């Protein structure tokens, strides 16, 4: 007969092995708290993703609206100026169709048309440059020739063709003759 080892009060496992782990109440609470934190963080992440997508869509919509506004501004930017020029065109058409042959009527029509054109220019902020006597400015004037004078050099003596500004920007420089000092 074989003898059985005495196991009373002794662990049947070898002395080197550790007892199997059993979850304690504290470990279970920590695990549950971590699971709740994970669920909370996943909800925050989902909300952040949704907020990001909304913000991205709003930014895209704003960009698209801005592009549309710019395109419309380019397309219809001259609308007010064009509306102011229509009566001028009507007056010129009427003058061209006039069969009366009256020079006085033609002159009156041209003066009226010029007044309409000046009003359209004023409305459109187009300003004529008539720089006689002003200091020559190459940004606003184009010198065609120079003439000797007794006065101050680099002054506009005559204007051969008026220039025009649109909101302080040169549309066309004035063609001018500029003074230079007399050579002795």
Image (tube, helix red, strand yellow):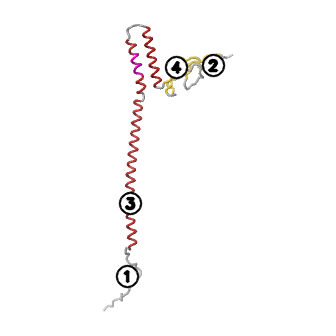
Provide the residue span drawn in magenta.
85-92
Up the image or down, 101 lies above or below 163; here it is above
- C-alpha gap between disc 1 and disc 4: 113 Å
- Of circles 3 and 4, the one toward us is 3
The x and y percentages for residue 110 are 44, 14
Determine whether 107 is above or below 171 in the image: above
Q: Quadrant of residue 69?
A: top left
Q: Earlier in the sequence, mark 2 or mark 4?
A: 4
Q: Secondary structure at mark 3?
A: helix
Q: What is the spatial separation of the Cα atoms under label 3 and label 4, in whole angstroms?
A: 75 Å
Q: Position of residue 166 (x, y in %)?
A: 49, 26
* Mark 4 surroundings: few (<14), some (14-19) or many (≥20) residues within 10 A: some
Q: Identify the element where label 1 is drawn.
A: loop
Mark 1 vs 2, N-terminal side? 1
* x, y percent for residue 95: 40, 13
Instruction: Find disc 4 in the rendering and name its residue.
Output: 162
- Say if 84 sits above or below 57 in the image: above
Distance from label 3 to label 1 (Cα)? 43 Å
Q: Earlier in the sequence, mark 3 or mark 1?
A: 1
- What whole-number distance in Å separates the C-alpha atoms at marks 2 and 4? 21 Å
Residue 40, numbered circle: 3
Do callouts 3 and 4 mark residues in contact (Cβ within 8 Å)? Answer: no
Circle 1 or circle 2, nearest the eye: 2
- Tell whether 17 sits left or right of 162: left
Q: Earlier in the sequence, mark 3 or mark 2?
A: 3
């Amino acid at each position: 007969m074989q003898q059985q080892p005495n196991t009373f009060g002794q662990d049947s496992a070898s002395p080197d092995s550790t007892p199997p782990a059993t979850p304690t109440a504290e470990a279970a609470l920590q695990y549950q708290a971590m699971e709740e934190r994970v669920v909370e963080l996943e909800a925050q992440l989902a909300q952040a993703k949704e907020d990001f997508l909304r913000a991205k869509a709003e930014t895209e919509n704003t960009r698209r609206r801005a592009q549309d506004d710019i395109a419309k501004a380019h397309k219809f930017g001259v609308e007010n100026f064009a509306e102011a020029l229509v009566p001028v065109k009507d007056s010129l058409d009427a003058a061209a169709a006039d069969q009366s042959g009256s020079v006085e009527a033609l002159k009156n029509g041209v003066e009226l048309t010029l007044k309409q054109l000046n009003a359209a220019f004023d409305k459109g902020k187009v300003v004529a440059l008539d720089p006689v006597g002003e200091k020559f400015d190459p940004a606003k004037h184009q010198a065609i020739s120079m003439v000797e004078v007794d006065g101050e050099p680099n002054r506009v003596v005559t204007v051969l063709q008026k220039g025009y500004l649109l909101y302080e920007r040169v549309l066309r420089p004035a063609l001018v003759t500029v003074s230079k000092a007399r050579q002795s």
